[in-house]
Amino acid sequence: MLRLRTDSVLLEASPVVQVDGAAVPGLLGQVSGEPVPGAGQAVLREQVAQRLGVHLGDAVELLADDAGVITVDVVGIGDTTSSTAALLGPGTLPDGVAEPAWFVTGDVPVTWGDVVTLNELGLSVTSRAVLTDPPPPDQVYGGLFRQPGVGLDSFGFVLAVGGLVLIEIILLIGPAFAVGAKRSARALALVAASGGEPADLRRIVLAGGVVAGVVAAAAGVLIGTAATVVLGLVVADLPNLRIPVLEPLAIGLVALVLGVAAAWIPARTASRSDVVTVLAGRHAERPVRRRVAWIGLGMGAVGVALSVVAAVASQVLLLAAGVVVLELGLVIASGALVALAGRLAGRFGVAGRFALRDAHRHRSRTAPAVAAVLAVVAGATAALVYLSSGAATQENIWQPVATGTGLLSLNEWSSSPQDLAEQYPQAAEIVEDALPGAMVTAVSSLTWTGSGGGPMPSAQPDPATVCPDENRQGPDAEDERCRTDPSVSAGFSWTYTIVDDGTLVDTLGLDGADEAARALADGQVLVNDPDAVWPDGNAHIALLGDGPDPVAAEVLAPAHLVDWSSHQYGLVLSPQVADQVTAAGAELAGDSDGFVVVPVGATVTGADLPQSEVDQINRQLSEIEPNIHLDVEGRMNGQDTGLTLVILVGVALFVALAATGLSVGLAVADSRADLTTLAAIGASPRVRRRITAAQAGVIATIGTVTGVVTGLLLGYVLGLWQGTDQNYGISWQTVVPWPHVALLLVGLPLAAMGAGWLLTRSRLPVRRRAMS
């Protein structure tokens, strides 16, 4: 990893590639300036250039561990979103500084046989030809070959999300075909009375779906192509703009299939309508069939069972299938939900009673809208739970050494104890000058002065807690001493064992830091493993060596247990115990080597640490030694999901309101005669507003409540999946973001009712209605 710096800023950048840009074009996307740098020149990614504050023609310094400082001129800035930070011209870096890699270009592909041959030479190869056309599994190492981006996990997610999106589209446009079929009911009945077969009626309604699908496909492809051309030629200035043919045709075919699928149920209903009832002008909604409701509920139960089994067994494809089956079951059962809600009509006033009964009578229009709201709310709720749980899990995985604290690190790896002692006061002075009022507290470490690392101290576990047979270790071992934690962890740490009298620990901001600081001041040691505290209350600190007896010496010290997960706190020595360990090490090493306490870094508290300020401080620290740097605890792993959750709720509200609005708009047109009758018998003009608001509320409430419950269930299932050993293990924490869920649960029905109230005219002209 190289470090890039200017007169005021330093940052770490990876990867930095030195290659002939003419032979491998496009590594940094569209480049402003010169896309092919020469020796001593560089092309920077746009985000890197902005953070450095440089423009075309400016100079940037490269800091490499084995090459000192190299100055390059910025000749281009690329707009790519790839991970490549900078592109250097050939000859910029001295030989031996960078790790060599090769791009193989030309018309001849690198085959799997070539990959095997190169692997035998010790080379790692990524071949486009092998990725696009992988060899048989029995020819691949381990019997497996997973193509990046199209593995089982990705395929499962695409299957589940794609299936749910297609279902949602069908549900959104389905009510329009249902109402259209109702308005054409008399014409269809005349066709049937004239000898038309049910199949003829189905074809007539399906033809409307075909026409709508063809028109939508043509319009969508034309608009999308035009937008792509405008974006490519005018906005993005793409040099290799190509208009595909097969892909738009496939998208158009999907639109056609969606149109036919949305019209299928209305067509099937129209073919089964009673001709006499329709010609007489009476309502002909078919009664609810209990078997349909039971089929839907059964499919939902099967979907839940499949999802749970797949989650526990970590079978992604089966999990995706279970989710889709669950959603389909709820869609099928949505008509029964509407019918069940219709039984509550007698408990409401005029508007609520009208809305519930209208929804029950016109289930072919209402049920798809309820199902659409249900599906989008369920998906949004599950996504809210998944994202919040993922953020909480990342926080759980991260093992902090402090809370909101600046962490200064010296070059522990290649600096001698004498060098570290000289570096620290200079680094501390730079930080204190840059951050007036900040408190810089030294981090001191027990370091071996000789070669080979020396006998490092380690807190040994109580023998009674050690697994008697390492072959029986595992997460489900019967003997709890043999149970292992399959979870993953990550975090910042200084390399060596910390020595502290309580001053450092008191600045960490961790829970229990005050008690830990007092324990160190009293001469105790800190450990974070309960097994490291023996029955006598002591920690047995062993000096581990490389000989036949790994424990070369042992020091006993009273132990204080802390609940800090970072392995940095596996053992923290007080100065008194550090003296004992130093004495024991001296006995082992003789007069030549031994332990010394030297500074390896510092904590920085009492000041704000914006990234721009940290970059400037790192620039000054690099003058002492290139590897000295300042980081901020929490910023290295922070995941701000707040905005993502708000966007997700907003999208769910928009789609759900769109589905509700479409259904309510059709309901208003469909029930105009009933509203005219109410107006004729003296109903208040505002009754129409209340009825429309109630109609929107019925759809939104049923769909939202059912969707939230379903989404919470899906979130739990996804939590089971991520909690398996193949994923995060016990580190996964399923968290429900209740404020966002409550916003969906309460806000969506209220928003739908408010929109229905505001967008409906209160007065309606009285029209003559023929009574039958």
Image (tube, rainbow, N blue to C red):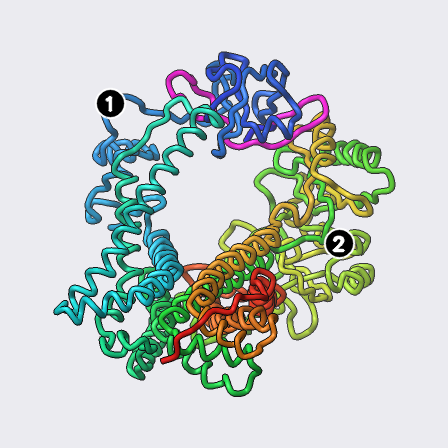
Q: How many marks?
A: 2
Query: Mark 2 falls on what kind of element?
Result: loop
- Quarter of the rendering containing residue 221: top left
On the rendered structure, is 377 left or right of 444? left
In the rendered image, the vertical position of residue 380 relative to residue 434, given as above or below:
below
Q: What amino acid type should be assigned to the residue bearing mark 1?
A: Asp
In the picture, the quarter occupied by the C terminus is bottom left
Q: What amino acid type should be assigned to the residue bearing mark 2?
A: Leu
For this rendering, which residue is in front, 563 or 320?
320
In the rendered image, the vertical position of residue 581 relative to residue 285, given as above or below:
above
Q: Which mark is residue 508?
A: 2
In the rendered image, the vertical position of residue 655 relative to residue 11, given as above or below:
below
In the rendered image, the vertical position of residue 520 relative to residue 30, given as above or below:
below
Is residue 19 found inside the magenta-colored segment of the image? yes
Local packing at callout 2 (Cα closer than 10 Å; few below 14, some 14-19, many 20+) is: many
Whichever of labels 2 and 1 marks the residue nearer the N terminus, that label is 1
Q: Position of residue 329 (x, y in %)?
A: 34, 72
Q: Residue furthest top?
A: 39
In the picture, the quarter occupied by the N terminus is top right
Local packing at callout 1 (Cα closer than 10 Å; few below 14, some 14-19, many 20+) is: few
- Quarter of the rendering containing residue 51: top right
Q: Which residues are magenta?
A: 4-27
Which residue position is annotated with label 1? Answer: 107
Is residue 48 found inside the magenta-colored segment of the image? no
Q: Position of residue 517 (x, y in %)?
A: 79, 60
Q: Position of residue 287 (x, y in %)?
A: 32, 82
